[in-house]
């Protein structure tokens, strides 16, 4: 990463692909979590036993709807941090031809993201119930349409693939490994072969546990890997690193096999209010997050996505790693003061 910065940005420089979900968030109590067997701070895929959860949460008096899905949140925040030009960020994912799908299209447009959805009518648009208790959030995703993304019906089309090749930085959250690993591989190989930057996120403990094979198939192409402390610990356990020291986990992750030797892998692990851990060359460095009064924290939903979004906004402008992390800390700090993954009109980041 150079420190040049201030490169004039063009449309479609940042490419994201993932699960577009409509977030349905509500403040709940511990009884609600217990009833559906949820942990206060977790993210899982909905099972049959959660059907009633979606019905029940919508009946609550104060429900908020926000355009969501991890990758979509991140590219939206990156675009917000960049401001102009519009459509620096591209997003691919699958939605249904329904009311929620229309909301997602409208929200992407409002965020000035160049969203190209694969639309199908067999499954409804995916939703994610965000069950908020204090400053914790338990996420239950019902992928529905998001699960129907098809490489040959969307990514492989010339007009869409052309948008992929226009990009210089790619970001796909680990969640998409449950949907279309072959799509991720095609994008990751393109980035690697053309010495562009491919970024990925560990996203949730269940990805390392149950989707380890596709995750490790993509890992050689990953230039920048994000994750939080819980995801890092699970990843380390699954790979038999035999350490729970986060700096050591970052180092061992950095040293996993890599396809494009021109770029050394960068590993960035966030830890909530504790220091962010990142590999800088051969060393592991700690970056303190911005101070925030506990009373100012409204909702931590989307904080991790926001960190990545801020980071990516600096990355596409070719800023140094330290600056990317600073931008990530700034945007996460903005998001946790608000409900859902929402933001004020303009950032105040210099």
Image (spheres, rainbow, N blue to C red):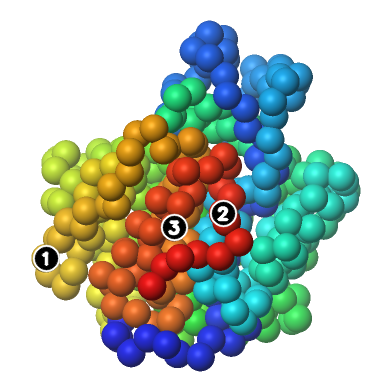
Q: Residue tagged by mark 3? A: 331
Lateral position of residue 98 relative to residue 234, left or right: right
Closest to the observer, 61 or 287: 61
State the quadrant of the N terminus: bottom left
Secondary structure category for the residue under label 1: strand
Residue 218 shows in the view: no
Q: Provide residue 236's location: percent of width, then percent of height.
A: 25, 44
Could you tell me which residue is drawn at 59 percent across and 87 percent down?
A: 10
Q: Provide residue 184's location: percent of width, then percent of height.
A: 54, 63
Lateral position of residue 211 relative to residue 10, left or right: left
Sequence-wise, which precedes: disc 2 or disc 3?
3
In the rendered image, the vertical position of residue 168 relative to residue 109, given as above or below: below
Q: Which mark is residue 283?
A: 1
Q: Are marks 2 and 1 in contact (CB under 8 Å)?
A: no
Q: CA distance from mark 2 to mark 3?
A: 9 Å
Q: Are marks 2 and 3 in contact (CB under 8 Å)?
A: yes
In the rendered image, the vertical position of residue 292 relative to residue 214, given as above or below: above
Closest to the observer, 343 or 313: 343
Q: Nearer the viewer, mark 3 or mark 1?
A: 3
């Amino acid at each position: 990463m150079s420190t040049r910065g201030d490169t004039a940005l063009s449309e479609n420089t940042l490419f994201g692909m993932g699960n577009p979900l409509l977030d349905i968030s509500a403040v709940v109590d511990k009884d609600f979590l217990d009833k559906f067997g949820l942990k206060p701070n977790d993210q899982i895929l909905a099972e049959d036993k959660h059907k009633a959860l979606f019905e029940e949460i919508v009946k609550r008096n104060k429900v908020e709807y926000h355009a969501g899905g991890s990758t979509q949140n991140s590219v939206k925040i990156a675009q917000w941090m960049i401001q102009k030009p519009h459509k620096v960020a591209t997003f691919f994912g699958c939605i249904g031809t329904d009311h929620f799908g229309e909301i997602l299209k409208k929200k992407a447009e409002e965020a000035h993201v160049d969203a190209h959805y694969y639309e199908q009518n067999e499954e409804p648009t995916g939703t994610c119930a965000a069950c908020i208790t204090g400053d914790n959030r338990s996420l239950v995703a019902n992928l529905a349409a998001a699960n129907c993304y098809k490489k040959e019906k969307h990514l492989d089309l010339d007009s869409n693939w052309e948008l992929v090749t226009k990009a210089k930085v790619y970001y796909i959250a680990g969640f998409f490994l449950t949907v279309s690993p072959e799509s991720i591989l095609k994008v990751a190989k393109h980035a690697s072969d053309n010495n562009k930057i491919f970024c990925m996120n560990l996203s949730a403990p269940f990805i390392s546990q149950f989707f380890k094979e596709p995750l490790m198939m993509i890992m050689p192409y990953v230039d920048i890997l994000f994750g939080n402390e819980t995801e890092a610990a699970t990843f380390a356990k699954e790979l038999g690193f035999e350490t729970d020291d986060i700096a050591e986990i970052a180092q061992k992750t950095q040293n996993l096999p890599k396809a494009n030797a021109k770029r050394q892998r960068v590993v960035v692990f966030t830890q909530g209010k504790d220091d962010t851990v990142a590999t800088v060359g051969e060393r592991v460095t700690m970056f303190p997050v911005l101070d925030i009064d506990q009373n100012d924290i409204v909702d931590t939903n989307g904080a991790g996505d926001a960190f990545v979004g801020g980071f990516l906004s600096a990355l596409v402008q070719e800023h140094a790693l330290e600056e990317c992390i600073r931008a990530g800390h700034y945007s996460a700090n903005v998001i946790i003061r608000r409900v859902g993954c929402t933001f004020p009109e303009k950032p105040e980041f210099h």
